[in-house]
Image: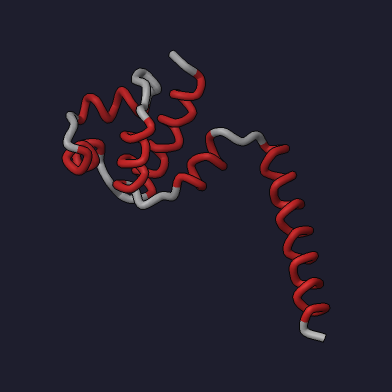
Amino acid sequence: MNDINEKLGLFLRNERILNSLSGAELAEILNISQQQVSRYERGQHNFTVKFLIFYCKALHISLDKLITHVFLSESDIEFNAIYTTKFRAVEQENSINNNK
């Protein structure tokens, strides 16, 4: 098993549950078997990018959310939050200065 596949599977399983979907209901949406959904959620099957996008659409989640929760470490997320806050402050300051 691949650690990334396990993280993806766990994240997608949690999102499916948050969307109040059973494995069988998601399988019907994705046009795959319930067993295949289970394999994806347990990290036993590799995702193609195309299928991952389709999976995210079925669960009404953005790829940004998926990437943030699966691929970024806690320190990456903290850095991104700090960077975004500072960037917005500079943007706002520039906007104020440009309006003078």
Placement of the N terminus among the 4 image quadrants? top left
Toward which corner of the image does residue 77 lie, by quadrant? top right
Q: Is residue 86 positioned above or below 18 on the image?
A: below
* Total numbered labels placed on residues in the image: 0
| Residue at 27% from the left image edge and 46% from the top image edge | 21
Toward which corner of the image does residue 55 lie, by quadrant? top left
Residue 81 left/right relative to 64? right
Residue 36 left/right relative to 89? left
Horizontal and vertical percent for residue 42? Answer: 37, 23
65 or 49: which is nearer to us?
49
| Residue at 75% from the left image edge and 72% from the top image edge | 92
Placement of the C terminus among the 4 image quadrants? bottom right
Horizontal and vertical percent for residue 10? Answer: 44, 32
| Residue at 48% from the left image edge and 41% from the top image edge | 66
20 or 64: which is nearer to us?
64
Residue 45 left/right relative to 94? left
Toward which corner of the image does residue 11 lie, by quadrant? top left
9 or 30: which is nearer to us?
30
Residue 46 left/right relative to 64? left
User: Which coloring applies here?
Assistant: secondary structure
- Looking at the image, the residue that sits furthest to the top is 1
- Looking at the image, the residue that sits furthest to the bottom is 100
Horizontal and vertical percent for residue 3? Answer: 51, 20
Q: Is residue 8 positioned above or below 67 on the image?
A: above
| Residue at 79% from the left image edge and 71% from the top image edge | 94
